[in-house]
Image: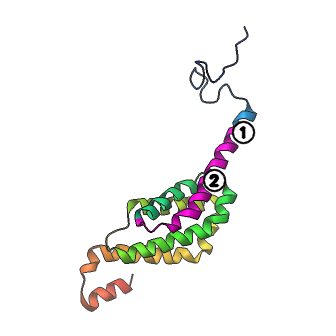
C-alpha cells in the first residue's frame, strides 16, 4: 500500500512515530542543518561585534554567557577564528569585574567562561596551552576567590606570606 507524502499542513508533521525529520530526505536535513549553522553563525557575529559598546555590566555579562553557549554550536572554523579574541575579551571583563567587586563572580559570567573553555578543549586543546590569557585568567580567578573568601581577613605578615606561597 502506498502512503501519501506528509506535508507541513497535515497531521503527520513532527509526530506520528517516525521521529523528528522522518518525512525528510537526507538533502532536506543537510539544508536544514546548513540554515541553522548559518543562523547561529550570524547571531555569533552580531553579538561579537555589538556587546562591547554597551556600558551596562549586566548586558556585557549576559553577552559573554550567550557567546559561551554559541561557541559550542557554531562551526569549528568560525570558533577557531574568534577564540583568541573572545578569550582575551572574557579575561578583560573578568579582570574589570574582579577589580569592581569583592564578592565572587556572577554565575552567568562563570558559565560563559566554562562554556568557552569547553569549546576550546573540544576544538583544539592546544589553544589553551598557547594562550597567555589563560595564565592571566587563572591568576585573576585565584586572586578573586582568595580576596572574597576567608583568607581576606588574615592580617599582617602571616596573611601576606600565606597568599604569596599559593
Q: Which mark is residue 42?
A: 2
Q: Nearer the viewer, mark 2 or mark 1?
A: 2
Quarter of the image for the N terminus: give it.
top right
Is disc 2 surrounded by few (<14), some (14 to 19) or many (20+) residues within 10 Å? few
Q: Secondary structure at mark 2?
A: helix
User: Does residue 14 appear to the left or right of 161 in the view shown?
Assistant: right
Q: Position of residue 46 (x, y in %)?
A: 59, 58
Image point (67%, 43%), residue name: 35
**Quarter assignment of residue 15:** top right
Classified by dominant secondary structure, the portion drawn in magenta counts as helix
Mark pair 2, 1: CA separation: 18 Å
Q: Which mark is residue 148?
A: none
Image point (68%, 38%), residue name: 32
Image point (40%, 75%), residue name: 142
**Quarter assignment of residue 30:** top right
Q: Secondary structure at mark 1?
A: helix
Relative vertical location of residue 107 with respect to residue 31 in this rendering, above or below: below
Magenta-colored span: 32-57
Depth check, front residue: 153 or 51: 51
Instruction: Kindly identify which residue carries mark 1.
Output: 30
Amino acid at each position: 500500500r502506498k502512503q501519501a507524502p506528509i506535508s507541513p499542513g497535515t497531521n503527520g508533521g513532527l509526530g506520528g512515530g517516525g521521529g523528528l525529520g522522518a518525512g525528510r530526505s537526507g538533502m532536506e536535513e543537510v539544508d536544514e542543518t546548513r540554515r541553522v549553522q548559518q543562523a547561529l553563525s550570524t547571531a555569533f557575529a552580531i553579538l561579537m561585534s555589538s556587546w562591547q559598546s554597551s556600558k551596562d555590566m549586566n548586558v556585557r555579562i549576559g553577552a559573554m554567557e550567550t557567546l559561551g553557549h554559541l561557541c559550542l554550536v557554531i562551526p569549528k572554523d568560525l570558533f577557531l577564528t574568534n577564540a583568541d579574541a573572545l578569550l582575551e575579551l572574557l579575561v578583560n571583563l573578568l579582570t574589570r569585574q574582579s577589580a569592581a567587586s569583592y564578592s565572587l563572580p556572577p554565575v552567568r559570567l562563570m558559565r560563559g567562561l566554562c562554556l568557552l573553555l569547553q569549546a576550546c578543549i573540544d576544538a583544539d586543546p592546544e589553544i589553551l596551552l598557547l594562550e597567555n590569557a589563560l595564565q592571566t585568567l587563572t591568576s585573576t580567578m585565584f586572586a578573586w576567590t582568595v580576596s572574597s573568601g576567608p583568607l581576606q581577613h588574615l592580617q599582617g605578615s602571616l596573611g601576606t606570606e600565606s597568599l604569596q606561597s599559593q
